[in-house]
């Protein structure tokens, strides 16, 4: 594979006051260890829903996990018995994955140009990573790589908008930080896919299906803040500018949760598209 194949869809910009999408997309490399430590996992109900909507158990299936990062979803897919290949463009995230999952095949590539033959995978997954691709390229690529009857599954853990303190925190951050949610597409993925003009032969079997699950984890306030700090917005912002925002959030949360433990609440947005 040449360096050209690894050029991001939008090449990194020179440092300006307004970072571009590519700066955010590969920002995680700088915080890979923190990402692995602070990011939430995914509950078993997610994989039950993937199996139900994809119409097949994961055991024994060939899965291509794109934007695999440090391997959080990759590991869980393997625990369900899937045979997983991880795809990750970022060298820092990939190095972390190699440390955690040394036996897993890892390919350095982008979702917009998957280095796999046609009709070779049962499932293509994107765990919190599809929004970094160009859907007009990554969806046809996934459909090309999928066997007939295979499925593309996209999911995101997002702060649960139905939980008052979580929703309030997101509103606070949005008011304070311009463009805070600009890369969020978790509940729009089905609409984005439906609007694509897909070539004959790559038509899906049916319209994409969306499902929202809810789950929680009890964690120290500082782990919640480390998770926030691992979001691309904060990473690109830099530690110096992020610190006062995170300090204010700590003070806010400790007023709400004086014992320092919070029930972090997530909505898990899943979209599944089946290939004909
Ligand atoms: C938020 S992380 C998700 C990591 C992992 N899947 C998880 O569930 O924790 C997003 C990942 O997408 C990767 N990424 C960025 N641009 C991408 C692209 N165009 N195609 C595939 N992955 C991309 C980043 O390097 C990063 O590792």
Image: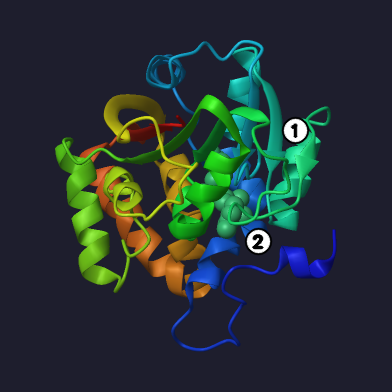
Q: Secondary structure at mark 2?
A: helix
The residue drawn where x is 39% and y is 32% is 272
The residue drawn where x is 70% and y is 69% is 7
The correct choice, above or below, for 227 with respect to 41 in the image is below
Residue 143 vs residue 160, the one in the foreground? 143
Residue 136 vs residue 29, the one in the foreground? 136
Left or right of residue 212, residue 20 in this image: right
Q: Quadrant of the C terminus?
A: top left
Most extreme residue toward the front, as rendered? 200
Left or right of residue 53, residue 146 in this image: right
Residue 122 vs residue 242, the one in the foreground? 122
Q: Which residue is mark 1?
A: 100
Q: Secondary structure at mark 1?
A: helix
Crowdedness near tag 2: few (<14), some (14–19) or many (≥20) residues, C-alpha within 10 Å: some
* Display colour scheme: rainbow
Left or right of residue 249, residue 77 in this image: right
Crowdedness near tag 1: few (<14), some (14–19) or many (≥20) residues, C-alpha within 10 Å: some
The residue drawn where x is 51% and y is 89% is 16
x then y, percent, for residue 253: 28, 46
The residue drawn where x is 52% and y is 26% is 150
Instruction: Looking at the image, tell me whether mark 2 or mark 1 is earlier in sequence order.
Output: 2
Q: Is residue 226 visible?
A: no
x then y, percent, for residue 251: 30, 53
Q: Is residue 193 visible?
A: yes
Q: Which residue is mark 2?
A: 30
x then y, percent, for residue 13: 58, 83
The correct choice, above or below, for 150 with respect to 90 in the image is above
The correct choice, above or below, for 58 with respect to 98 in the image is above
x then y, percent, for residue 36: 62, 41
Question: Does the beta carbon of the residue at mark 2 sit less than 8 Å from ligand 1?
Answer: no
């Amino acid at each position: 594979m040449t360096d050209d194949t690894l050029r991001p869809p939008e090449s990194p910009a020179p440092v300006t006051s307004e970072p571009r999408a590519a700066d955010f997309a590969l920002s995680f490399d700088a915080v890979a260890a923190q990402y692995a430590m602070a990011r939430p996992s995914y509950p078993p109900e997610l994989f039950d829903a993937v199996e139900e909507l994809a119409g097949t158990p994961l055991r024994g299936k060939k899965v291509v996990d794109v934007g695999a990062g440090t391997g959080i979803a990759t590991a869980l897919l393997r625990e369900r018995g899937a045979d997983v290949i991880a795809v990750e463009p970022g060298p820092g995230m990939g190095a972390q994955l190699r440390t955690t999952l040394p036996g897993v095949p890892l390919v350095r590539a982008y979702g917009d140009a998957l280095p796999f033959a046609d009709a070779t995978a049962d499932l293509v997954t994107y765990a919190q990573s599809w929004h970094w691709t160009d859907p007009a390229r990554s969806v046809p690529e996934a459909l090309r790589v999928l066997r007939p009857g295979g499925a593309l599954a996209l999911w995101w853990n997002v702060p649960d908008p139905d939980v008052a303190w979580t929703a309030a925190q997101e509103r606070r951050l949005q008011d304070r930080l311009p463009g805070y949610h600009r890369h969020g597409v978790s509940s729009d993925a089905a609409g984005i896919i439906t609007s694509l003009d897909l070539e004959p032969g790559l038509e899906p079997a049916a319209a994409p299906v969306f499902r929202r699950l809810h789950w929680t984890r009890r964690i120290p306030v500082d782990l919640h803040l480390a998770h926030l700090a691992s979001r691309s917005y904060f990473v690109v912002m830099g530690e110096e500018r992020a610190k006062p925002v995170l300090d204010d959030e700590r003070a806010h949360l400790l007023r709400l949760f004086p014992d320092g433990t919070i029930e972090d609440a997530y909505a898990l947005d899943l979209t599944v598209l089946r290939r004909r």
